[in-house]
Amino acid sequence: MPTLKTLNVGDQATISHIDGTDAIAMRLMEMGLFEGETIRFMGKAPMGDPLEYEVCGCKISLRLSETERVHIVS
Amino acid sequence: MSKSASDESAGRAEVVSLDSNSKLTFALIGNPNTGKSTLFNALAGMRARVGNYPGVTVEKKVGNFRYRDHEIELIDLPGTYSLSPRTADEMVSVRVLLGSQGRSDPPDAAICIIDATHLQRHLYLLSQLLDLGIPTILVLNMWDEVQKQNLEIDVKTLEQRLGIPVVAASARSGLGIPELKDKMIALLANHQSAGESKSDHLELFPENFRRARAEISRIIQEKAAQRIPEYLAERLLLDINGETEREILKENDELAKILQSKREELKQDGCPIPAIEPRVRYGWAREVLEGVIQRPETPVEQRGSSLDRWLTHRFVGPAVFAVIMLLMFQAIYTWAGPLMDGIEYIQDEISGSITGVMPPGAFRSLLTDGIVAGVGSVVVFLPQILILFFFIAILEDCGYMARAAFLMDRVMTKVGLSGKAFVPMISSFACAVPGIMAARTIEDRKERFVTILVAPLMSCSARLPVYLLMINAFVPQRSIWGGFVSLQAFVLFCFYLLGVLVAIPVAWILKKTWFKGEVAPFVMELPNFKWPSFRVVFFRVWDRGRSFLKQAGTLIFLTTIIVWAAGYFPGDRTELNQVKGLLESGKLSEDRIAQEIFEQRNRELSAQLLNSSFLGSAGHAIEPVVRPLGWDWRIGMGAIASFPAREVIIGTLGTIYSLGGDVDEKDSGLIEKMHAARKADGSPVYNIPVALSVMVFFALCAQCGATLMVMRQETNSWKWPLFAFTYMTTLAYLGAFVTYQIGMIILPAA
């Protein structure tokens, strides 16, 4: 299943689920990255990490390692 | 939903009279970036009491105000996305709300502030709050932004569906604040008249989860003999490896196994832990918001969207950031200078007028060199603290701070920190005191502590006089690399670099030892850009300045008094006082030769008395220890005297070389004396290796009482300043030793 990592800047996708049961997974969900939500890839920091997304109308920043855990509907 | 609609009475405060003698307590809670502090100030004004909760680093902020004959206490809880405690710090909010933090009762009610433009996400926290069963008022903040974006939010329907009072507000402009105050009183009047101390809690979880939760409560009561609130039983089930597990299970393997099997059972039963929680809470939020928000057909372009593209742009972003940092650095480094000089001037004036009216003696010395100097040594930090926090408050309030962390994250992860540590670190080059205070913006405790512990390694402005003295005195004035760079400037640069180069492995080691564990998530909100509000900036600067004076100030003051006493006692000062009295009487003003003789005597006696004081004895005592660094007892004593503040070394050297205490780093007399100083065997005390060894020592040592006291304030423990002191002093000693020994090999008798 594709993850956020596969998106290009400007792409939009629907979140299917988040890997893991740890603090990072919970934090992602609390911040609105939850199944069924639409997420948009807004851009990258100058050195390619972290990345900026828009979800629930909020802009959030994720590290590359965190994006691999967010699965999207293909 | 089991809540009854309180809509009826919510708007009419006077309908039910409330016992006006009792104090009403409200807890204020909300996500970060919702304007929570602004609301706190709008309600309670500037007179908040700030302290710490015992054992954690959570700031306790309580404000009081009166409204319609009611005394209201407002407790500000830290900004949070959820009430799922993962650390002891996050547990504090839950405990405050449950009334089990210390001996406190639970608050009468909670005010939940949310960003009205991001309703859905923020309802997550509200649902947990309602789950706790505490009477709650919802504040839809940023209402002005809702209007700007042409959003339509049906507050009435929302109020009915939630069954709690809802207030549309804009804390920045004061919109909705009177209505909120009315509703606060009305809510409690309503509850009191209904004779219920607690409202029913919001139940969202499926039947099988509820059963498991009740069973867990029962088992804990049986096996661990504790009655735990239902909410904590819920957290126990939901938060895998969370703080609730640590605090309640206390490594009880049997309970841990039971808990594990319960979670497994629930998972088999279609209730996966922890995903069930966001599922039910977001499900509820979507249901509640169904049809409540009407968005305009053509969305209004949000301010700053294009700005954001530039500020996080690959080339423009870092360039803008560099300019802002340079400006900020320039401000704390240079602009604070005249203000600090002003404070020193006032301090001198006060000392001068005391000297004018009092005869010389221990009491006068205590007043001028102890108390006035001590107050001065605290106040002198204020310009830098206030200027830095002025910048930080603006950058935070307009939303840039998060972008700065976004830009710098990659660089900072190389040393195991995150982008949020960059601003505290760079500020520490001016002064570690505001730098350490700036580390509050880092939410993750481990990262915040590592930042605080390495920040004092950055070469602050107080090290500069020491560097300049040694460089001016011992580094030859010539250019290197084809005349482009002066050797003196190059040496100075190297010393600035030294702190950074040492900080990298120290941070790395700290992250691998005391502060190891899973990497803090860097999921960070990038708030929308907005114009900074004067009030917010002002409150923040005020708050920081005040907490510094109150918490660290007293301790810095005490340290100065102690060092004064160590340099003053013991010693027979009769002759010195006579000489001083004679000089000050003005009787010698006619006779220049006599005046000079007595001034010389004054300086000699001061040097002798310092030599025989506790401080001087300490210098002699540690001479064997500092000899491998190439130092004599005078430098050793100067180093000891400089532990409260490193710049003191210059005045101390001035006194011991009979030049008086008011020399500065450019003083040619001091430089001459240092060149002329000889050891017992006739060889010079100072040479280049000795000068470098002194500089390395001063670069790495924690010679700053203020830094250590602020560290105590920010970590809420003596352990960490003690640790920083130990590791930095050790590093400084080893560094100075290696520098001297190597220096003597490659620069023999230079």
Image (tube, grey):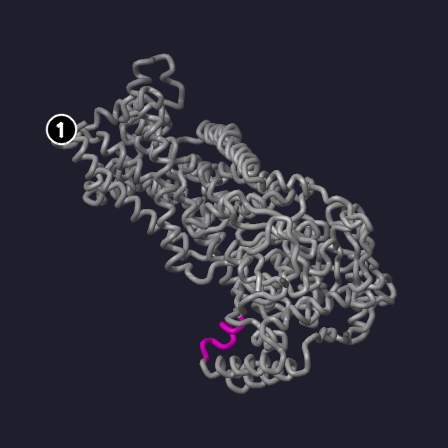
- In the figure, is residue B42 to the left or right of B705? right
Disc 1 element: loop
**The magenta segment:** B244-252
Which corner quadrant of the image does residue B392 belong to? top right
Chain ID of residue with mark 1: B
Residue A4 x %, y %: 58, 57
Query: Which x, y percent locates residue B425?
Result: 46, 43
Which image quarter holds the N terminus of chain B?
A: bottom right
Percent across and percent down for residue B125 are 67, 64
The outermost residue toward the front is A74
Magenta segment, prevailing SS (helix, strand or loop):
helix
Q: Please identify the residue farthest to the bottom as the structure is shown.
A: B222
Rendered position, B5 above or below B47: below
- Is residue B164 magenta-colored? no
- Is B133 on the left or on the right of A27, as rendered? right
Question: Is B251 drawn above or below residue A67 in the view shown?
Answer: below
Residue at 33%, 19% in the rendered image: B483
Give the class, few, some or many, for how many residues have Cα within 10 Å of label 1's Cα (few <14, many ≥20).
Answer: few
Give the residue type at disc 1. Answer: Gly
Which residue does the image show at 73% across and 69% down from the upper left? B284
Q: Based on the picture, tell me whether residue B250 belongs to the magenta stretch.
A: yes
Q: Is residue B363 visible?
A: no
The residue that mark 1 highlights is: B682
Q: Name the one closer to the observer, B693 or B349.
A: B693
Image quadrant occupied by the C terminus of chain B: top left
In the image: residue B512, left or right of residue B53: left
Q: In terms of image quadrants, where is residue A36?
A: bottom right
Looking at the image, which is closer to me, B199 or B266? B266
